[in-house]
Amino acid sequence: MTAPQTTQPLAGDARRRARQRRRDRAFSVLCSLATAFGLVVLATLVIDVVYDGAHRLSWEFLTSFPSRRPERAGILSALVGSIWLMMTTAVIAFPIGVGTAIYLEEYARPGRLQQLIEVNIANLAGVPSIIYGLLGLQIFVRVLSPLTGGRTVLAGSLTMALLVMPIVIIASREAFKAVPDTLRQGGLALGASRWQVVSRIVLPAALPGVLTGTILALARAVGETAPLIMIGALTYIAFLPEVSLDGLRTPFTVLPIQIFNWVSRPQAGFHVNAAAATLVLLGFLLLMNTAAIILRNRYQGHRES
Amino acid sequence: MHDGTQVTPSASVKLRVRDLTVRYGDKVAVDGVSMDVPERRVTALIGPSGCGKSTFLRCLNRMNDHIRGASVTGRVEIDGLDLYAPDTDPVVLRRRVGMVFQKSNPFPKTIFENVAFGPRVHGVTDKVALREIVERSLQRAALWSEVSDRLDTSALSLSGGQQQRLCIARALAVEPDVLLMDEPASALDPIATTKIEDLIHELKDEYTVVIVTHNMQQAARVSDFTAYFYLGRLVEFDATERLFTKPTHRETEDYITGRFG
């Protein structure tokens, strides 16, 4: 027996509708304002820096060493120092970080030890960067000075590697978790050993995610100043470290420190230089983040197919 | 005692199972099952959800080793060799006993790389040999004609039915004696299912097949012997025709006629 069907019109109550519509619109306006606010602040900062420093950008600026005369000063040593530091940090942090993630995801048995490690890594990701600087100063610069040569690129890279490692580990673990377990089962059922499954199936599948995480971690490292000041990255470097293992054991400077140094000087010319160097740093970061986004999009595409 | 050793199939015995019990913590998933799996025949495992048939299947290639908290007691032999002996290497075992899963799980690699994966991990590096193995396996899985011109494209671009046949080709590439199939066609449409069933029919000439299925008509169509599981116990094991037309046990008859489950 069917229930009697109501003859209520679909139109409903007009006043309720109007109120609902106003509320919806108010909410979307609020969200747009919040977004606009963020964009406006960012745009103001960027435009300000561009206005101050864009005209100073030139090939000569990029390829000159710092100097006491602002018109002659350039960021060559700082730029190369940043690149050199970032690459060495990557070489140290990537294998150890990804290796740790592999151990935690694929091999460790759930239990007290694993939980302890996880909690510690999560904490390390939140430690202020200057603490890493203090650690790096004592251990890498002082205690290990026969190995690192003191206040050098190597000491700086080791410190920065410690700084970014928790991020690499966490991002890599997420990437491994995202690989469906059915793939591991399939590999094992074919007679592959655990290591073969990890190295030939899981790691290749997770690689885009792992790389994205690593690039973002390195992008953070590029902008760090405090720990490197503690390490003793100098502010007047008028030479380039040679591209060799010995070169790792030479003093260095990086872009953020050069900028900081120039901003602290009284001459206006140096402030212009600082703005220009900031633009270079921003460009650098934009490049790295774009690479990470492109990688991540390819990753999503792969998963969807 | 209900067990599957009292039927003497006309074929020789490939896998001998005695008193197999599998526990997940406190829960008993497989309870004292004994069975002889005949060589080069298709044996179907049927029963309602949760009756232990998939767990039982996974014991035959020791995939339960990778499930935390699973404990296995009893004896399983292949050609007289103890699967669970301390010096048995599961990696070597899984070359002889292959598995195809319910939902096809091709690796996110090319079609060629998927099929070549097994031989590669077992040490085959010669490119010519690999190409031969891949072609042969894809032909045996009745997939060659459909993919021979695009071996270097992603396996994920294949249809569901094709992906499952790819997984079968992948399993065949390591040249197993036994092929375990866990509801291989349950995620496929009727046409793809028919292709898989025809394939199983052909594979029987060379391989021993054990197939878990919740589809009784499929079991009746495809298998030579059928085992009915209920709540972890093996209730009845017989030649398929006899089990479906004149089952010995009341429980079997109830399940087959759809009175439950």
Image (cartoon, helix red, strand yellow):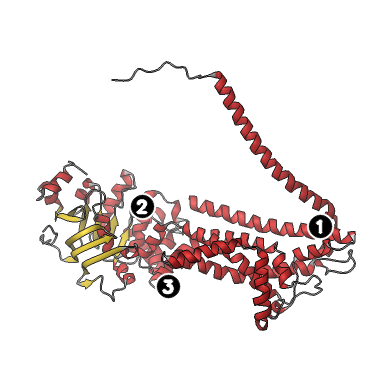
The part of the image, by quadrant, that contains residue B30 is: bottom left
Residue B48 lies, in percent from the top left, at 23, 48
Q: Are marks 2 and 1 on the same chain?
A: no
Dot 2: element: loop
Residue B139 lies, in percent from the top left, at 34, 59
The part of the image, by quadrant, that contains residue A75 is: bottom right
Disc marking residue B103: 2
Task: Name the residue carrying label 1.
Answer: A275
Task: Name the residue carrying label 3.
Answer: B126
Q: Are marks 3 and 1 on the same chain?
A: no
Q: Is residue A114 above or below residue B250?
A: below
Dot 1: element: helix
Q: Are marks 2 and 3 on the same chain?
A: yes
Q: Amino acid at mark 2?
A: Lys
Q: Is residue A16 above or below residue B62?
A: above
Q: Amino acid at mark 1?
A: Ala
Q: Could you tell me how far apart the alpha carbons at marks 2 and 1 are, in whole angstroms? A: 57 Å
Residue at 13%, 59% in the rendered image: B3
Residue A189 lies, in percent from the top left, at 34, 63
Residue A200 seen: no
Q: Of B228 and B24, which appears nearest the observer?
A: B24
Chain at numbered mark 2: B
Q: Quadrant of the N terminus of chain B?
A: bottom left
Residue A30 lies, in percent from the top left, at 65, 36
